[in-house]
Every structure is written in structure tokens, then in C-alpha cells.
Image: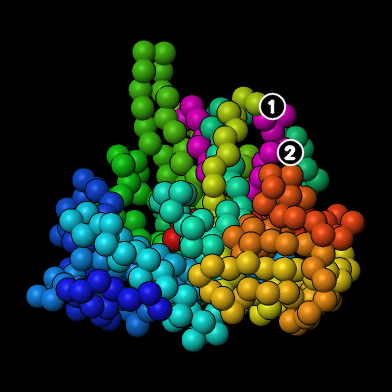
Amino acid sequence: MTSLPDGYRPVDVPETRRPELQVVDSWAFPTSTSDEKALEVPSSLTWDRTRGIETADGELVACHSSYPFSTFPVPGARTRVSGLTWVGVHPGHRRRGLLTSMISEHFARSLARGEAVSALFAAEPAIYGRFGYGLAATDLHLKIPRGAALRDVAGSADVRIRLERLDAERHGPVIAALHGSVERPGWVTRDSAELRTARLADPEIYRGGAESLRVALAERDGTTVGYALFRRKEAWEIPGPRGTVQVRELVAPDAAVSRALWGVLIDLDLMATVEAGMLPLDDPITHLLVDLRAAEPRMGDNVWVRLLDVPAALAARRYAADVDVVLEVTDAALPANAGRWRLVGGPAGAEVRATDDAADLTVDVRELGAAYLGGRSLTALAGAGLVAERTTGALHRASTAFGWPQAPVAGWVF
């Protein structure tokens, strides 16, 4: 692991040090919320995975943690992923190598737990590429006008939608079950009790003037099969009401449920706009809207992926087509990943082993992370000069195999 400069030491951060952790976080990420108010919100952290750096006199000046995503969906399978989070350095201690040391420690601890993949959301995209993280998913943000026309879907009239105030104790189990059943690559699971509790917490300080969270429950034959979490924010102008519906999360197992939920959300009284973000690029709403342009679609970067153990990570997912390719991988931070790996895989599984055979493709671990969830084409990366083809035809075959029918997305920021 990368060592710290003199005067600093790595430490565990137990829950008893949460107030100190909050101070570091508010210095790293300025907010109008006081530390005292922030501490009233349930913590999402797993404390035995939370670490920090303190000075010789015991002041906590940097921190990082990770979430235990034990059932993280990847193409055709699920695997263990270490979700890097709460990374922050006090501005008075920047440019001293503290971040580099924490990332190195995160890699080592994740590998020791058998987690071959790390994932994160990047507050600053320019930072994490140099540590080998690749942008693996893009999400979609929409501002749908109230009453926007939707195409009809057979069976949607048979889905009943109930609107209720969110009650975490009552609604939590069904939300957890439905959210956890989604197989879309990158759909970050909430595998710990702390995450499930924190995700449904709804303190007034985080509402931004909007109402408390509501839930739209989709029922078919008396069984809840889908849901949407949302809140409304009123606004009044001279022409009349101009409120906004903020859709926080929507889970639907099929087109009929999706159509029924969206149909209710875009037709709420006193509202003018429905804002929905972190949607996959192929979300059903993009096809249901008669006029997608009117929803002002905008893309943003979503989850970033880092392969910590290249052979284990590549063997953990499935492939859209049969593939037999030798990848020459470069990895400046984790030399064990560097070298040539033969990937033999397909829809049923994959095997990866070290080889001395000539390389078909040359790729850095950053680009492998970008392609890992099936949302970034190896061919496109090669077009940008980031992947090199050594054997004619290998790029097309590998790009086809690494692709996936569903666009990846993480539905919430962790």
C-alpha cells in the first residue's frame, strides 16, 4: 500500500467517531446543513469498513468507507462489489498524498475480502481515472411536461396504482424486495440494513422545500409488483400552478406496470413538470413518450468501475456471444493484473487464465472497467485510441461479447 507522509496515520473510524467524520465530510463537501442536523439522519455506513487518517495529535483529517454490495448485478450474473464512498480530505491537508494512500488501502482491503470489483460515483470525474476507474454507465435526466402523451400498453389498465405517504417501516420490506429483484447491470443493490434504512430516511432538511416522500404502489391481482418514490414541490406563477414532481426511484417489472406508474406521475394536479434522473438510457419512458424532445433529455455520468482482480472479475460476468480472446492488460496501480489473460466465455459463463500467447487486444484496466457492465463499446474505446487491436477481427468479436442488451445504470448515488 502507498505510505503516508510523516505526521499522519491510518485509523479505524468506529461509530463513536461519527461526529468527527461528519466534520471532515462537511469540510470536503460544503453544505448549508449543520453538522448537528446531519447527525440526526441515520447513517448508511458499515462501520467496520470505515477508515480515516488522523494527525499525530489525533485530529481526523481524511476518511473513506465502502459498502458491501454482495449481490451487485453484472451482465448475466451477480457478484461482490466494494462500493467506495465518503471519500474526503480536509482542505487544510490536501496535496499531501492522503487520497492516494486511502485509495491504495481501499484496494488492498477489498481484495482481502474477496471483492474483485470496486465501484463509485465520482464527485469530480477527473480524479478517479488515474486510479484505474472507468466510466461504465451513463444515465438520463428528463423534465417531462405535465400531461405529456404516452403510448398505450396492453394490460396497463389492469394495474392499480395506490398513492400513499412513505412509511419506511410498512413500505420498506416490499421496496427492498422489488428493488433487489432488478437484474439490470450496475443496478446498485442495498444489501446492508444501514443502507436500506438510510435510503428511506426523509428528514425535512433534505427536502429542499418539497413535501415528504410519497410512494406510488403498483398492484396487479392484489400483489404489489412495482413502485415509485416521489415528492411534489409547489410553485405558483401569474398564469397558475407550476409545481414539480420529483421522481426519486421507479421500479417496474414490465411495460404495463411502467406505463401505469408514469401515467399517474405525469398527471398530478397543480404540477407542471415531472423531473426524473438517473434513468437508464433505454428506460421504457423514452419509448412511451410520444414527444421525447419535449422532455429535454440530458445525459450524465453514472457509476464508475475498477477491476481489482482482473481474471476473477472477468470470470464473474457473462458474455453476449461466445468469445476467445487474449487481452494484454496494463495496470499501473495493481501489477498483479498486468499481463496477458485469455478470456474464454459466452452466455453460460467464462474462464480466464494467464497466458504467454500473443495478444489480440491491448487495453488498460481503466477501459476494461468502462466496458465491464456492457454499456461502453470496446470498439468505441478503440476509436478513441484507448484500446489497440493486435489481431484482425478480435476487436469486433470482443466488443460484441462484452456488450449487453440492457443499458447499465445505478439508480441512486452512493
Secondary element at tag 1: loop
Distance between mark 2 and mark 1 Cα atoms: 9 Å
Considering depth in this image, is 21 or 283 the residue closer to the camera?
A: 21
Seen at 43% across and 53% down, the residue is 127
Residue 169 place in picture, x, y as percent: 40, 69
The quadrant of the image that shows the N terminus is bottom left
Please check the rendered image and state whether residue 249 is part of the magenta-colored stretch, yes or no. no
Dot 1, how many residues are within 10 Å of its Cα: few (below 14), some (14-19), or many (20+)?
some
From the image, tell me which residue sits under label 2.
287
Amino acid at circle 1: Asp
How many numbered marks are there? 2
Please say which color scheme the image uses. rainbow
Q: Are marks 2 and 1 in contact (CB under 8 Å)?
A: no
From the image, tell me which residue sits under label 1.
291
Seen at 90% across and 56% down, the residue is 393
Give the residues in magenta: 271-292
Considering depth in this image, is 287 or 104 the residue closer to the camera?
A: 104
**Most extreme residue toward the top, as rendered?**
238
The quadrant of the image that shows the C terminus is bottom left
Left or right: 390 in relation to 407: right
**Most extreme residue toward the left, as rendered?**
57
Report if residue 210 is visible in the image: yes
Residue 178 place in picture, x, y as percent: 60, 66
Amino acid at circle 2: His
Secondary element at tag 2: helix
